[in-house]
Each structure stands twice: as C-alpha cells, then as structure tokens.
Amino acid sequence: MKMTCIITDDEPFARKGLAGYVEKAEFLELTAVCEDALQLNAILQRQPADLLFLDIEMPQLSGIAFLKTLAQPPMVIFTTAYEQYALDGFDLDVTDYLLKPISFERFLKAANKAHRLWQQQQQPAPADHIFVKTDGRLEKILFTDLLYIEALQNYVMIYTTTRKYIVHLTIKSLLEQLPADLFIQPHKSWLVAVDKIKSIEGNQLFIGTQAVPLSKYLKEAVLEKIVNNRLLKR
C-alpha cells in the first residue's frame, strides 16, 4: 500500500518539480496538486491524505496559518525558500522542512522519514490482554495483572494480582498467546511474569511467597531474559 500525498505551492515550477520527485518515489502516490491553501482545504474535505508537501508563503492563507486550522493534520513537510520559518515548523511538529531549491536527495530523505513514521502508524497496537474461558464465561486478563501459571494435568491455574482462574488449556497454548519479552517458562509446568519475580534462590524463583521451580536446563536462558528485562526498564 502506498502513502498518499498532496502538493500545495503557488509556484507552477515548484509544483512540477515536486511532482516529478514524487513520481520517482515508488512508495508515494500523488493524489492532488494545489495552487493554494484554500484549494487544499477543499480537497481535504473530500479525500484525506497521509502526507502534505506544503509551501509556506502563499497568497490569502500561508501554509503555517492553514496548518493551524486543522484539528487532526496529516504529516506535513514544509517546502519553502525562507529559513526563518524553521522554528514555526518545529512548534507545529512537522515531519521535515525543505528549503528551496530542493534537491532530489534531500527530498528523498524527508520522504523516507515520513514513510517510516507512516508505516509505524499502520501497525496494530500490541495486545495487552488475553481472554480465557472459565466457569462458562470468557474472562479478560491483563498482562500487567498476571503473576504466574501452573499446569495441573489437563488444565492450568492462572494466578493474577486479584484472583485465580481454572482453565482447560495447556501451557504451550498459553505461551503462544503471551508476549515473549514479558513472560518466561522456567519449568515445563510453569509460566511466570518476568517483572513479578522478586528473588532467585538456587533452583527456585519467588513471586511474593510463591516458589516456582527453575529447571537446571533452562536456568541460563531464564536468567539472561530476567537481566535483559531489567536493563530495558532502566
């Protein structure tokens, strides 16, 4: 999927040059070219865009003034011949600021930056919970509430900060649903939230007063994950 963009500039030569640059960038799709901010405003009412290449000095309404009218503006790359507006661009949180004459190299650098940000926005937010079926209903369990899970024959006991759940699932199926950076399997019959571990003594992990066995075959990998988790939170 391409990133849609609109060029707005009161100079025909500038519009043509930017349009040529956009055509060379395979990840961009030019959906409109405007002569001023009012024309751009009318187009945005009909078709939103992911990115605006926006001139600043234009008749009737400047690019800066127009941007301030948008409640939820798309990403913007200012294109201007005037350096003094750089601070305004920073205050308005624009993606980049291109000074005319604009080289293709500088254009591509700005476009790549916008594309990276856009791709990040397209990614779904990571899940923060799981649903499990217990007592005939589905229960939502937040990862932040989960302490540890113990396998008991053909079901598991899920312990949270507020209660415990008996669920007909396997440790393996739960492990596939939990974020690998937040949970570890210190023993074939246990899963543990890394940030809930209070201490390690010999071949045991302690979550509060609960002792969880630590397999000697998994000990090195578990300790490494615990250390990495602590470092990431510094």
Image (cartoon, rainbow, N blue to C red):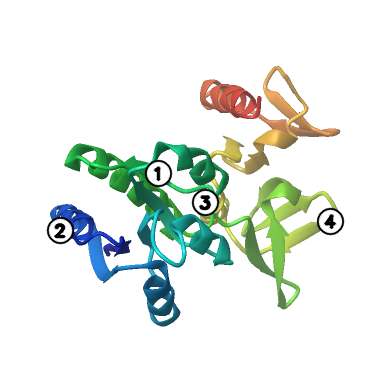
Among numbered discs 4 and 2, the one appearing first in the sequence: 2
The residue sitting at 53% across, 27% down in the picture is 218
Where residue 183 appears, as percent x and y from the top left, is: 60, 41
Q: Which residue is mark 3?
A: 172
Q: Which residue is mark 1?
A: 96
Can see residue 123?
A: no
Look at the picture and state if 200 lies above or below 124. Answer: above
Among numbered discs 3 and 4, the one appearing first in the sequence: 4
Of all residues, the one furthest to the front in this rendering is 59
The local secondary structure at tag 1 comes to strand
Where residue 190 appears, as percent x and y from the top left, is: 64, 42
Give residue 195's quadrant in the image: top right
Among numbered discs 1 and 4, the one appearing first in the sequence: 1
Which amino acid, mark 3?
Answer: Lys
Q: How far, Cα to Cα, is label 1 from label 4?
A: 50 Å
Choose between 2 and 202: the one closer to the eye: 2
The local secondary structure at tag 3 comes to helix
The residue sitting at 40% across, 64% down in the picture is 59
Where residue 38 appears, as percent x and y from the top left, is: 42, 73
Q: Which residue is mark 2?
A: 23
Q: How far, Cα to Cα, is label 3 from label 4?
A: 22 Å
Give residue 200's quadrant in the image: top right
**Image side of residue 220 versus residue 19, left or right:** right
The local secondary structure at tag 2 comes to helix
Which amino acid, mark 2?
Answer: Glu
